[in-house]
């Protein structure tokens, strides 16, 4: 059984479907054929039984007894003489009386004697039996009363040949068997054809997957009818969506690697140059002037800081959605902005930051949301003139940060959230070009929106909109043990 199951599982899906269809049709045809055969058998036997009941009146003489010694005389009741049938009288001791007009003798069984013993004039028994030559017959045995010759209880047995009936049933069985076989074969062929037609999209999907595995070509697409809504169409659409997402992810990954390599090259080159100057000065024994040495060390420190910031930004961008989802919780946007403002004031002590904050709760990752707000404030601090003012407002889940700097040219606004993009006028300023990209990703993952636009009167205004969340319940202080002093 296990080997058969393993062999079945090793077959292709279309072959298994064809086998299942053929098996289902075979079961249905077999059930219908057997039912039909038994119904026809019952109808034929009912007809034979009716014929036997008609023979009861023809199996006796005018006086109601079986004439065994000689054939009956021709008289007006000649039409009641048996034709093509068996007639005999069976007595209680098992002896029989067979008239000459009977076709032969029917073998007596225990059921016939049971009819005599029951002595019931109203009931009779039907059974299948054989004559003395072994030919099949249908027998009806009916109690007739006391035999006038032997004074024993006796029963009348009438029978008719079953050769025609059995021949008809055998022919019917053969026809049903042939029809069933043809039906099963046709069902198997039809099931195979239907399976091939139905699984053709699956074959195309398999070929596409094998092509992707072999060539890593994610540009392949499976044609799908727009009106199709079956499982195969849904699977094909899901495959196309998956390959599109993978192709986009790979392109973004390659772009990120290329941009990161480009951005890393500049600080690494500067670091290498400065370190080589310091090393050469130590090796040649000609120390650099103290002012130049301090400038080189300050430059090295600034480049290392820039590299650390760039690597941190890259790590933030490379985090998966699943890693983020584990840290999402309801946070107070007001507290997050206040924490970011404290850091911004340290980075721009000469600036005036005017803040007006209203309570607002949202669902986000606390650290990532604070980093995003810090990046927006850093951008405002970086471009604000010395002694300028930065206006920060939080009202109804909308955070606005406005500076009074030079602003962003209109042609550059569509690119401000791209990775590693930096305005030509800001390339001399520190930064990796990833700050606003991190802001956009964090806000979008939190279900919000962020925009940068020109401010009335000059400068730039950053607008962040975040959906609200239920206010968390206040933390209850732990109950103190009354036994504690």
Image (cartoon, grey):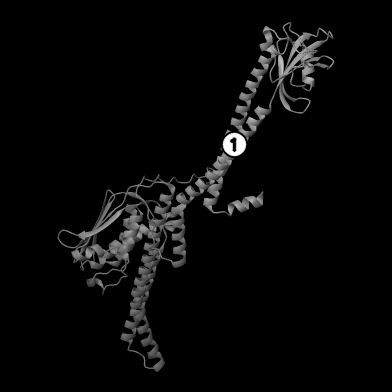
* Left or right position of 279 against 117: left
Q: Position of residue 377 (x, y in %)?
A: 28, 62
Q: Residue at x 26, y 73 (%)?
A: 427
Q: Residue at x 36, y 72 (%)?
A: 258
* Left or right position of 389 against 267: left
Q: Residue at x 66, y 12 (%)?
A: 79
Q: Quadrant of residue 169?
A: top right
- The residue lying furthest to the top in this view is 63
The kind of secondary structure element at disc 1 is helix
Q: Which residue is denoted by mark 1 in the rendering?
A: 175
Q: Position of residue 6 (x, y in %)?
A: 62, 53
Q: Position of residue 373 (x, y in %)?
A: 31, 59
* Left or right position of 207 against 104: left
In this view, 330 is above or below 157: below
In this view, 364 is above or below 179: below
- Graded by Cα atoms within 10 Å as few (under 14), some (14 to 19) or many (20 or more), the crowding at tag 1 reads few
Q: Nearer the viewer, residue 434 or 354?
A: 434
In this view, 155 is above or below 34: above
Q: Position of residue 414 (x, y in %)?
A: 24, 62
Q: Is residue 354 visible?
A: no
* Left or right position of 173 against 228: right
Q: Is residue 202 visible?
A: yes
Q: Nearer the viewer, residue 390 or 181?
A: 181
Q: Quadrant of residue 47?
A: top right
- The residue lying furthest to the front in this view is 74
- The residue lying furthest to the left in this view is 457
Q: Quadrant of residue 204?
A: bottom left
């Amino acid at each position: 059984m296990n080997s058969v199951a393993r062999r079945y599982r090793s077959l292709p899906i279309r072959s298994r479907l064809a086998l299942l269809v053929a098996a289902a049709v075979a079961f249905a045809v077999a059930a219908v054929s057997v039912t039909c055969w038994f119904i026809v058998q019952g109808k034929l036997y009912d007809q034979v039984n009716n014929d036997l009941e008609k023979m009861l009146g023809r199996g006796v003489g005018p006086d109601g007894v079986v004439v065994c010694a000689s054939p009956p005389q021709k008289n007006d009741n000649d039409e009641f003489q048996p034709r093509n049938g068996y007639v005999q009288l069976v007595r209680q001791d098992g002896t029989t009386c067979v008239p000459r007009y009977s076709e032969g003798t029917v073998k007596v069984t225990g059921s016939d004697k049971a009819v005599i013993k029951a002595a019931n004039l109203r009931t009779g028994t039907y059974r299948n039996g054989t004559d003395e030559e072994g030919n099949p017959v249908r027998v009806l045995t009916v109690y007739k009363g006391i035999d006038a010759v032997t004074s024993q209880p006796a029963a009348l047995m009438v029978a008719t040949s079953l050769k025609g009936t059995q021949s008809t049933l055998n022919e019917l069985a053969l026809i049903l068997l042939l029809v069933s076989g043809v039906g099963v074969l046709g069902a198997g062929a039809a099931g195979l054809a239907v399976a091939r037609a139905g699984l053709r999209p699956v074959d195309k999907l398999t070929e596409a997957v094998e092509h992707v595995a072999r060539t890593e070509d994610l540009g392949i697409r499976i044609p799908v009818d727009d009106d199709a809504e079956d499982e195969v169409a849904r699977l094909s659409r899901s495959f196309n969506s998956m390959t599109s997402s993978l192709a986009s992810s790979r392109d973004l990954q390659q772009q990120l690697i290329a941009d990161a390599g480009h951005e890393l090259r500049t600080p690494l080159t500067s670091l290498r140059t400065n370190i080589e100057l310091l090393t050469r000065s130590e090796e040649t024994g000609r120390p650099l002037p103290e002012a130049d040495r301090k400038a080189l060390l300050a430059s090295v420190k600034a480049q290392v800081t820039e590299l650390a910031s760039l690597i941190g930004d890259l790590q933030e961008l490379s985090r998966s959605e699943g890693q983020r989802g584990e840290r999402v919780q309801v946070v107070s946007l007001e507290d997050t902005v206040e924490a970011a403002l404290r850091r911004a004031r340290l980075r721009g002590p000469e600036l005036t930051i005017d803040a007006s904050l209203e309570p607002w709760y949202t669902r986000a990752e606390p650290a990532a949301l604070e980093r995003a707000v810090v990046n927006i404030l850093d951008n405002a601090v970086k471009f604000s003139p010395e002694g300028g003012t930065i206006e920060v407002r939080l009202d109804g889940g909308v955070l606005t940060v406005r500076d009074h700097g030079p602003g962003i040219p209109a042609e550059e606004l569509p690119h401000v959230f791209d990775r590693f993009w930096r305005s030509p006028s800001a390339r001399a300023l520190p930064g990796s070009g990833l700050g606003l990209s991190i802001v956009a990703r964090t806000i979008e993952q939190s279900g919000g929106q962020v925009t940068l636009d020109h401010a009335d009167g000059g400068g730039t205004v950053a607008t962040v909109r975040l959906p609200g969340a239920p206010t968390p319940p206040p933390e209850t202080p732990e109950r103190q043990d009354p036994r504690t002093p």
